[in-house]
Image (cartoon, rainbow, N blue to C red):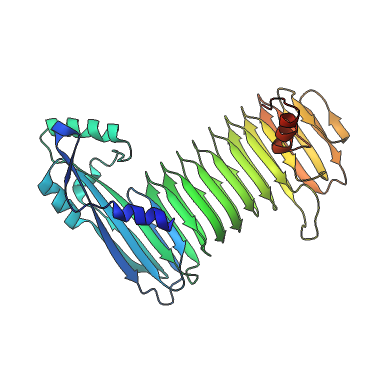
């Protein structure tokens, strides 16, 4: 992540560069850096109108680096917008709020996404015909977070969020970008749309509401996921699992569906529409199962003491029935498979067969 930021800074230009030939569109970036004395405050908010946010662990300092990039069809307007762009830092009760402030003329055209050049070019052409100055702004934040900060709120649009190695609860409200969070100690609450989400090694509970983006979670405690139009893949989750999805598959791999010393009551509930539910237990499960599919396609590789077995429902006990598992889908299949996809693939490759 640090290398990525260093590369970003090395690309900052002090000159206005013309883009798109005849349209004479110019672009310029500027780094603004602020060190925050947060005292006893343990809560932090970062708000960006458009752009990426990166957080990494530090020993005892909150240092904010913000790269403002202005794209304009006027050199004078570009300089003015760059001068007016700033980092606003204020205290509100028990938290510090860090917000990127950008010029007003940006707001009229805030639907232009800078990482899609064809949209920017088309917008500039339309505005140029009206002989109106046009500025588009992105703000990329890079912030160091000490352990004393125990709660962080992030808000942005049209930009990625990357977080690694911090010990804080997180609340995120974002859209149009990827979320990558790894090695975090704390609970995570996410509301997102139009972007993939990857969460790895989370020592805390996860609550996630997403749409139009793939969700991948590996090594976490209790998780609650609501998603749509893209797949949900969960691996090595130890706690309770609750997932709602539609129009894409849900896969649970290497999940503990048996009682361990640290477990009390564990529940797994997956509801899906027009998407399969596929489960690969870590080892032989010990579950009380209730599975429903209106298509009638339900299969289980393990012996089950059935209490209900008909066209669209399979209920019963596998092993001692320690974990409650409730699965329901429409117009798709439910599968509980003994071997993982990786094991099946290796076996097929060893025989010279193809694994689909």
Residue 313, picture quadrant: top right
Residue 294, percent from left and from top: 71, 24
Q: Which residue in the rendered view is the most extreme toward the right?
A: 305
Residue 34, picture quadrant: bottom left
- The relative height of residue 20 versus residue 223 in the rendered view (above or below) is above
- Near-viewer residue (27 or 306): 27
Residue 19, picture quadrant: top left
**Is 226 positioned to the left or the right of 128 in the image?**
right
**Is 75 positioned to the left or the right of 241 in the image?**
left
Quarter of the figure that contains the N terminus: bottom left
Residue 71, percent from left and from top: 21, 44
Residue at x-position 33% and y-position 40%: 115
**Is 191 positioned to the left or the right of 339 in the image?**
left
- The relative height of residue 194 versus residue 355 in the rendered view (above or below) is below
Residue at x-position 45% and y-position 68%: 58
- The relative height of residue 141 versus residue 233 in the rendered view (above or below) is below
- Near-viewer residue (336 or 7): 7
Q: Which residue in the rendered view is the most extreme toward the bottom?
A: 39
Residue 90, percent from left and from top: 32, 67
Residue 200, percent from left and from top: 58, 52
Residue 47 seen in the figure: no
Residue 122 seen in the figure: yes
Residue at x-position 17% and y-position 57%: 83
Residue at x-position 32% and y-position 50%: 49
**Is 89 positioned to the left or the right of 70 in the image?**
right
Quarter of the figure that contains the C terminus: top right
- The relative height of residue 172 versus residue 63 in the rendered view (above or below) is above
- Near-viewer residue (287 or 17): 17
> How many marks overall?
0
């Amino acid at each position: 992540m640090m290398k990525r930021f260093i590369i970003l800074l090395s690309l900052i230009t002090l000159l206005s560069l013309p883009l798109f030939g005849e349209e004479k569109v110019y672009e310029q970036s500027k780094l603004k850096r602020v060190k925050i004395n947060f005292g006893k405050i343990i809560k932090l908010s970062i708000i960006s109108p458009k752009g990426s946010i990166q957080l990494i662990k530090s020993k005892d300092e909150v240092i904010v680096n913000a790269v403002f990039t202005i794209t304009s069809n006027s050199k004078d307007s570009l300089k003015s917008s760059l001068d007016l762009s700033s980092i606003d830092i204020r205290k509100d009760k028990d938290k510090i709020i860090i917000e990127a402030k950008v010029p007003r003329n940006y707001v009229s055209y805030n639907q232009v996404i800078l990482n899609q050049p064809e949209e920017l070019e088309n917008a500039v052409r339309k505005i140029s015909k009206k002989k109106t100055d046009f500025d588009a702004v992105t703000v990329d934040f890079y912030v160091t977070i000490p352990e004393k900060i125990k709660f962080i709120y992030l808000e942005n649009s049209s930009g990625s969020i990357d977080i690694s190695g911090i010990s804080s609860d997180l609340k995120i409200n974002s859209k149009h970008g990827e979320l990558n969070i790894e090695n975090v100690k704390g609970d995570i609450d996410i509301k997102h749309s139009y972007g993939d989400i990857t969460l790895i090694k989370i020592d805390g509970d996860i609550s996630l509401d997403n749409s139009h983006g793939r969700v991948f979670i590996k090594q976490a405690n209790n998780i609650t996921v609501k998603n749509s139009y893209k797949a949900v893949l969960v691996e090595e989750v130890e706690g309770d699992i609750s997932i709602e999805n539609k129009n894409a598959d849900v896969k649970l791999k290497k999940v503990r569906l048996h009682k361990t010393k640290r477990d009390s009551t564990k529940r797994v509930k997956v509801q899906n529409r027009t998407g399969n539910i596929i489960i690969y237990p870590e080892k032989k499960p010990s579950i009380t199962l209730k599975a429903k599919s209106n298509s009638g396609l339900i299969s289980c590789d393990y012996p089950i003491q059935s209490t209900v077995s008909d066209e669209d429902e399979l209920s019963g006990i596998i092993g001692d029935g320690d974990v409650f598992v409730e699965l329901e889908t429409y117009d798709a299949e439910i599968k509980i498979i003994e071997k993982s996809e990786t094991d099946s693939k290796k076996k097929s490759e060893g025989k010279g067969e193809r694994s689909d």
